[in-house]
Amino acid sequence: MSSPIAKSVKKLASRSSSRHTSAASSARKRVVAGKSTRLKPATKRSPAGKARARKAAKVRTSKPVRTAKPKPKSPAAHAKRQVAKSVTKSTKPAKADRQVTATAKKTVKRNQAKPAPGRAPVIFKKPAPTLPPPQPTHDEAAALRAFEAAHKEFARGRFAEARSLFRSLVEKYPTVSEVTARSRTYLAVSEARLRTELAMPRDADSLYDRGVIELNRGEYVAAQELFERALRREPEAAHIHYGLAASRARLGAIDTALKSLRRALDLQPKLRIRAQRDQDLNPLRSDPEFDQLIFTARD
């Protein structure tokens, strides 16, 4: 019988031979496949590494920390806070308004910095202070008063009186150039009218016809003068009174025009039909006395 020591030696030899054959076969397989692999050395974790891994796992799996909720405030404090927010919102301009004002300011600055091509930059200047008009001197004031008096006679058709007044004004105030220049013009017109008067017809009908011509031409002053001359020769002519009323109405003398019209209708009532459509009497239509004269029948 074999001893137990011999048995154990045989077992070790068989194990080593089997390991050798298995390693050789695996090496042969690797060579056949054409791949060379290296065995990775086995690394053992230290106890400190295991502790760190456990701590990281604990941190990852830890629950989120809960924060304490704020305590609800009283309704009065909540209302005050809402009122303060609304006031601040109302005082602050809207976002769109702020953008519009910002863009407007940018455009104004751009236009001021860069004028449009082909145009000169606009420069706003302060208006010059207005000075009071100069006061007329003593001679200028007297010349103006004399001119007004002479012009009244000229407007009335009294050319002889107007001629004498304009002539005396030119002789008395030669230094007042503006007034004397206008006076010389009216003086020449007055003299021309006086010269034409010498060639005028003498009878009333011819004077009336000339007056109608001047009235149609728009020369109301000349027409008034001609009608007045005709009335001096024939005071009871209704058509001449009517023509005088028309010329005075065109000149704006409402009272004297109504007086002449009343006299014409008293002499010839049929003239009411003509007066209803006469455009020369339009300035009299706003007066109530005109309606009484034209549209009220008399006994």
Image: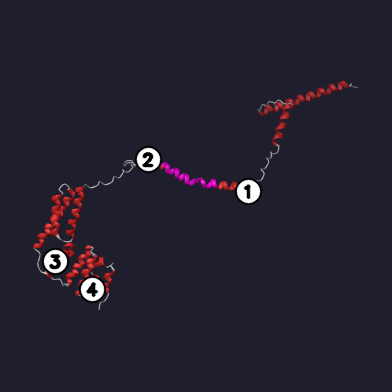
Mark 2 or mark 4, which has the lower sequence index? 2
Tag 2: residue type? Answer: Gln
Mark 3 or mark 2, which has the lower sequence index? 2
Rate crowding at label 4 as few (under 14), some (14 to 19) or many (20 or more) other CA atoms within 10 Å: some
Tag 4: residue type? Answer: Arg
Which residue matches tag 4?
Answer: 272
- The magenta segment is 87-106
In the rendered view, tell whether residue 291 sits above or below residue 149: below
Which residue matches tag 2?
Answer: 112
Determine the CA span between mark 3 and mark 2.
73 Å
Which residue matches tag 3?
Answer: 229
Mark 1 or mark 3, which has the lower sequence index? 1
Q: Residue at the spot x=42%, y=44% of the render?
A: 104
Residue 132 position within the rendered picture, expressed as x and y whole percent measured from the top left? 28, 46
Residue 254 horizontal side relative to residue 236, left or right: right
Residue positioned most to the right: 1
Mark 1 or mark 4, which has the lower sequence index? 1
Q: Residue at the spot x=17%, y=70% of the render?
A: 240
Mark 4 or mark 3, which has the lower sequence index? 3
